[in-house]
Image (cartoon, grey):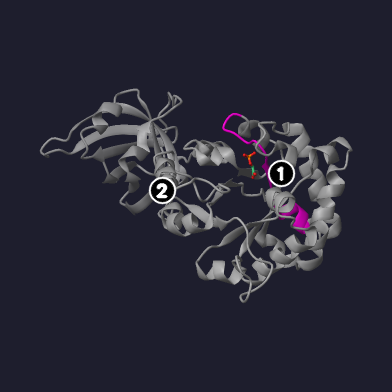
Amino acid sequence: MPRKPIVGGNWKCNPKTLEEAQKLIGEWKNQVPLDKRKIDVFACPMMPHLLKVKLPMEKLGISACAQNCSKTGEGAFTGEVSAAQLKDARVQWTLLGHSERRTKYGETDEEVAEKVSQALAAGLKVVLAIGELLDEREASKTDEVNERMLKPVVAKVKEEDWSRIVIAYEPVWAIGTGKVATPEQAEETHAAIRAYMAKAVSEDVAEKVRIQYGGSVTVDNCAELIKKPNIDGFLVGGASLKASFMEIVQKSTPPPVLKKPKWSKITDLNPTTKGFNCMLKCTKAAAQVEGTEGVFEAVCGDDTGMCTVSFRNKDLCDICKEGASLRMQNAAVRMVKGGYMRLVVDKWSAFKPADEPVDFEVKTSNDVSSVEYELVGES
Ligand code: PGA
């Protein structure tokens, strides 16, 4: 099973006003909507903004994520917000262990692990950030540092709870510097993190855990990075404060899988056939049926037989011209009566010119002497 991509925006201590935060959400709304079935998206505004923009964000399919939570529960802990308090505020996600928390506020690997444990116990989902400093990379210590940061978390988290953790690999030298890791550098490190997870937790968790890349991700570099097999999305800082964040989301969404429809032959159909597609050639152009008002009929067929297509939408006459190749998609057999088969499609648009020509010369006879197509639904 391929891993579902996940992209997050880390707003850090930005923007200055709530109005600006709301404006940004408004700009996201004007972009191409995201497809929640194919990608998970979250954003991390700072706490007072988070609770104000949460609903408008959720309407766009974007989950609210806190930037941090406490390693303790409720009580005499001035300045802290507990995991359970986040959960109570209907916040589903929290970011933990961001390098700015580690390097500027002295959070240790053990403290981050304790926070992860608190967050999971409160029912939150966690984005766990890890990553090496520049001198650690230069000393070839990248994998060692990532393992050191993961180890205390591995010790505290039950195997089944890894489904609620996303790892964000963020090399500190790439954060806010414009110096993005190359796709090869990022892929190599992501693969090493996955290999460590296989060894330290299980093959299954290693296969399923999503690993985001973070550090100077932009609209221009994300498409190359997401092609790498072990990169499952991004944690975006600076570029998430722009309308074009939604373009990063778009570029990280897997492209639609285009499946060629399987074509059915008229003779293959029986009264219970549903969801079939046929390719037909129009052998006699559509014309109004004598004695009727607004009923049109064309003669069509595939290489197994002929049928009559009747419809009330005059616009279909334009496509039912002699010699035209047509296709009917997602149709169902409604009834078979006296050699007549009634075929139903639920959208007019499902009966349209075929992309490829339907070619048959010999009109063979078949069991169904005539087929009547009934077109119903939207015009
Ligand atoms: P950046 O920040 O994209 O601005 O480099 C990333 C992060 O800190 O998560």
In space, the residues marked 2 and 1 are separated at their CA atoms by 27 Å
Q: Nearer the viewer, mark 2 or mark 1?
A: 2
Q: Determine whether the residue tagged by mark 1 lies in a helix, strand or loop.
A: loop
On screen, residue 121 above or below 102: below
Coordinates of residue 224 in the picture (x, y in percent):
66, 31
Give residue 22's mark: 2
Q: Is residue 51 visible?
A: yes
**The stretch drawn in magenta includes residue 370:** no
Circles 2 and 1: CB atoms closer than 8 Å: no
Report if the beta carbon of the residue with label 1 is closer than 8 angstroms to ligand 1. Answer: yes
Is 217 colored magenta in this rendering? yes
> Where does the C terminus fall, quadrant-wise?
top left
Q: Is residue 377 left or right of residue 368?
A: left
Q: Quadrant of ligand 1?
A: top right
**Callout 1 environment at 10 Å: few (<14), some (14 to 19), or many (20+)?**
many
Q: Residues within 10 Å of mark 2 (few under 14, many from 20)?
A: some
Residue under the image location 61 percent in, 75 percent down: 74
State which tag comes first along the sequence, 2 or 1.
2
Q: Which mark is residue 170?
A: 1
Where residue 298 appears, as percent x and y from the top left, is 27, 32
**Left or right of residue 14, residue 232 in this image:** right
- Give coordinates of residue 172: x percent, y percent: 73, 42
Boundaries of the magenta span: 204-220
Is residue 75 left or right of 155 when viewed as pictured?
Answer: left
Report the front residue among 284 and 10. 10
